[in-house]
Amino acid sequence: MSYKAYPSYKDSGIEWLGEIPEHWAIERFKFQLRAGFEGLKIGPFGSQIKAELLSDEGIKVYGQENIIKNNFDLGHRFVSEELFCELEVYETLPGDILVTMMGTAGRCQVTPEKINQGIIDSHLIRLRVNKCLLSRFCKYLINDSAYIEHQIRLMGKGSIMHGLNSTIIKNLIFILPPLKEQSIILKYLDKKTAQIDELIDKKKKLIEKLDEKRTALITHAVTKGMNPDVKMKDSGVEWLGEVPEHWDIVKAKYLFTIEKRIAGFLGHDVLSITQTGIKVKDIESGEGQLSMDYTKYQIVKVGDFAMNHMDLLTGYVDISQFDGVTSPDYRVFRLSAQNCNPQYYLYHMQRGYKEKIFFNYGHGSAQLGRWRLPTDEFKELSFPVPPYEEQQAIAEYISSETILIDSLISKTEESISLLKEKRSALITAAVTGKIDVREEA
């Protein structure tokens, strides 16, 4: 669909921004905030809401998870009425703009009308705008417009920690249509983005089904083998069930050796464990969590298993294709037993995450993203040990059978990326006045 431009434009005076509609204004964001601390408030220091001060009921504490997932029902952190009275200046009210500061910096949501009374934590910034800017229009600007993202990246360079701060927020340049026009653009974007989001949701559900099919195939192969007529026995392990009678059951401590080799100096590639494999981190980009001292990271060699056992909900495990270093909090290990196929046991390890097997053996606080698998628990986990030739055949079978599934998942993910790009481009064009949607809304 082609969109028409505005009748007349003017030079914005900013090279990377170009022209804007003649009747629109350009202002620093600080001039659109309410006066004083009411306009911009960073959440309380962590020491003000320590873990021991949290309870299972009371006044809710909202954090980054609520913003990133756009769900204000998530979370189980609460403070007492007494502590809330001390921290009342951090309360969030309907219409507030809440922005994430670290990690996925710059994501925001507008506090909905019907939420539980609550305060923000130290990883959020609360914004309250004046009557010339609609909160939901501001949300589109911060979340989805390329020109705001460009400024955040530009002003964030050189900072010790990759993230937002009050100075960056205040100095963002905003393009402001008249208030009535903001409402029209909002109406149009709500309609169009809802259509795109519906398509994205359908594709995500397809990926979920494909992933479930993939996991089921792997689980059956690594626990039952490939011979449907083989005699079975009870493994004695709940998450394994019955296994072929000729397979052994062996604890992890007899199969693997845990390595702990601290780098001691800089110069290594820094490795990140992701859901799509172990990757070399681009430190220069400032993406993700950064460390102040990589000399304390542990060495990973090609062929090592590297496992994020600190967060069993979002973590993962893989065999490294690179030499490098990774977080000293992660687990690095190798197969020590003879006649064991690494790929066969990698499928077991990854199944441990996919089916939340490791999660069931974990300890900690899932709400805080700290659900861990202690070393002692890991060592006591039992795994099947088929004959080596059978391990190899199973690994090759899984690899060949999952190629098509992985290809379909990859293509669906690519189409989701294209839809997201289309969504972002449409929003950017609308909020910068490159297209005139006043008659389309």
Image (tube, grey):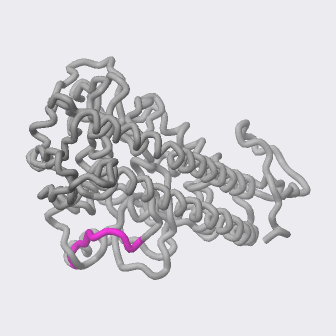
In the visual, does 255 lie left or right of 404? left
Q: Is residue 411 magenta?
A: no
As drawn, 413 above or below 68: above
Q: Residue at x 32, y 61 (%)?
A: 121
Asked whether residue 73 is drawn in magenta, I would say yes
**Do we see residue 315 in this rendering?**
no
Check the image and name the residue furthest to the bottom: 114
Look at the picture and state if 352 lies above or below 270: below
Image point (32%, 68%), residue name: 75
Choose between 337 and 143: the one closer to the eye. Answer: 337
- In the image, the segment drawn in magenta is 72-81
- Quarter of the image with the C terminus is bottom right
Q: Nearer the viewer, residue 343 or 61?
A: 343
Image x and y of residue 15, in percent: 73, 36
Q: For the point 73% across and 55% down, which residue is it?
A: 25
The N terminus is located in which quarter?
bottom right
Q: Residue at x 55, y 37 (%)?
A: 154
Q: Is residue 85 left or right of residue 161?
A: left
Quarter assignment of residue 296: top left
Q: Position of residue 332 (x, y in %)?
A: 22, 34
Q: Picture coordinates of residue 181 (x, y %)?
A: 75, 68
Position of 316 compared to 83: left or right?
right
Q: What secondary structure characterizes most of the magenta part?
A: loop
Give above or below for 208 relative to 405. below
